[in-house]
Amino acid sequence: MMGGTTIHPVWTEVNLAGAYALDSLGEVCERFFGDAPLIVVSDERIWNREGKILEAALKGRRDYSLFLLPGFPAPYADSELVARVRAAIGDRSALAFGSGTINDAVKLASFELRRPYICVPTAASVDGFAAFGAAITVDGFKMTLDCPAPKAILADEGILARAPEELTAAGFGDLAAKITAGVDWMAADTALVEAVAPEIWDMVQPFALSILEKSAGIRRRDSAAISDLYGGLIATGLAMQRYHDSRPASGAEHLLSHVWEMEHLSVDGIPVSHGFKVAIGTIAATIFQRALFSLSREEMEAASKAASGEILGRRLAAAERLLAGTPILEKVRETVREKTLRGAALAARRAAIINGWNSLSAKALSRLPEPAFLIARLKEAGCPVRLADIGLDRDSLYRGFIIASIIRKRYTTLDLADEFGLLEKLAESASTNAASFPQRT
């Protein structure tokens, strides 16, 4: 099997969370930065809300300069932002004080400057704080760029509990997404593409499955529930560190999110957060996967015999049709050519799927929540559950499914369905159900 099977050492050496986590901040800065000058990177809204706590943690221990990005509109994680942050850091060492976008920008900028950095998260909003890699848009294309995680992550539980409700809800959506991502990894394992690494799997999946039961606590801003959420997000980031790839955390639901990210999805002019896009993506992916794995082995064998052998041409035509005039078209063409199997290689992959189908489908269906249950938990935690909540409709979701199947080389259930000639049918059905199902809850 192909894929990142090497387990790497964890880059983050200090990982503290709790009421007194920031008491160690000065000492941690000395440990990793020595006498180098320090710059704190944040944005105006975060600093105005919580900056005094960081000031107190550094007072008498460390002089620092402050670089504040505008708070509104919220900073957008693209190459331009990274360049601004890199210029601000200059010859200093950096401390990222904020949520996901601030962390990713400082992470990549620090790597480009060949310096370690420290992260102080201000919300349990994403899994990227501890991740190996930064999610950045480059030339219109959403990418996860390789770069080391922070050397230290220190989170104050009071700051996390006071974070805006929508940020915590976004984190809930991001952690719940690991359920469908895990099913995609199981499919890649069965297809002999990328073996599941049990040690990495166990760092993520128990948190993903258990967080759904804590939605009411998240909505109440219960400190224990938020602590569990943050712990699951950090554990996922550490899993990505050890795997040196986002496979443990990202599947079809994130590919859908990446499509909407590149299309600058917004509501009333305000960009939809990563976690909210992923929440809707998880609903859609769950409906899609449950329909796929409800097919029998005999139905998959029949689909394999009926499927067209000319997948490459069909995928390239979809790219031309759906992405004409966009800056990512040529990149997607390259990706399609690299990922698409032909002839004997495609037949061998289909055979591997069919041979393992009964076991794979049983395990997948046992893990995937019923859509009604998933929607209720996401809604209770404060996530959007209707397509219209994030500016989508049935047709835009269907379009998203097709684009998501071709923009990355990562093998997911979208690829599995496509290689059996089932993608369009299942995407149409899932899009229709996702558009109507939440209305009935």
Image (cartoon, helix red, strand yellow):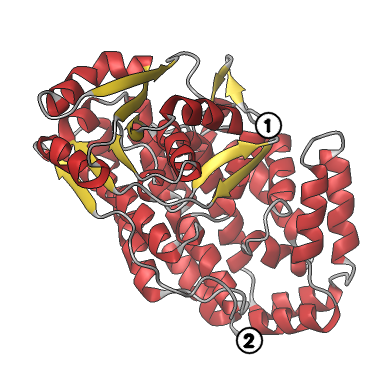
- Residue at 79 percent of width and 72 percent of height: 341
Q: What percent of the width, then of the height, locates residue 126?
A: 39, 41
Q: Is residue 212 left or right of residue 249?
A: left
Kind of element beneath mark 2:
helix
Residue 421 in picture, x, y percent from top left: 79, 65
Q: Position of residue 151 (x, y in %)?
A: 30, 49
- Residue 108: numbered disc: none
Q: Is residue 341 left or right of residue 209?
A: right
**What kind of element bears circle 1?**
loop
Q: Is residue 379 above or below residue 345?
A: above
> In this picture, is 61 found above or below 185?
above
In the depicted structure, whether residue 419 falls above or below residue 282: below
Q: Looking at the image, can residue 363 be seen?
A: yes
Q: CA distance from mark 2 to mark 1?
A: 39 Å
Amino acid type at circle 1 is Glu
Residue pictured at 33% horizontal, 61% vertical: 10
Q: Amino acid at mark 2?
A: Asn
Which of 247/389 is in front? 247
Q: Is 109 placed above or below 402 here?
A: above
The image position of residue 37, as x and y in percent, is 29, 30
Question: In the image, what residue occupies the spot 42% across and 15% down?
Answer: 71
Specify the label residue 355 is tagged with.
2
Residue depth check, mark 2 versus mark 1: number of the one nearer the observer: 1
- Between residues 22 and 389, which one lies in front from this camera angle? 22
Give the total number of marks visible in the rendering.
2
- The one nearer the camera, 113 or 153, is 113
- The residue identified by callout 1 is 263
- Quarter of the image for the N terminus: give it: bottom right
Q: Nearer the viewer, residue 77 or 320?
A: 77
Q: As drawn, is 23 to the left or to the right of 372?
A: left
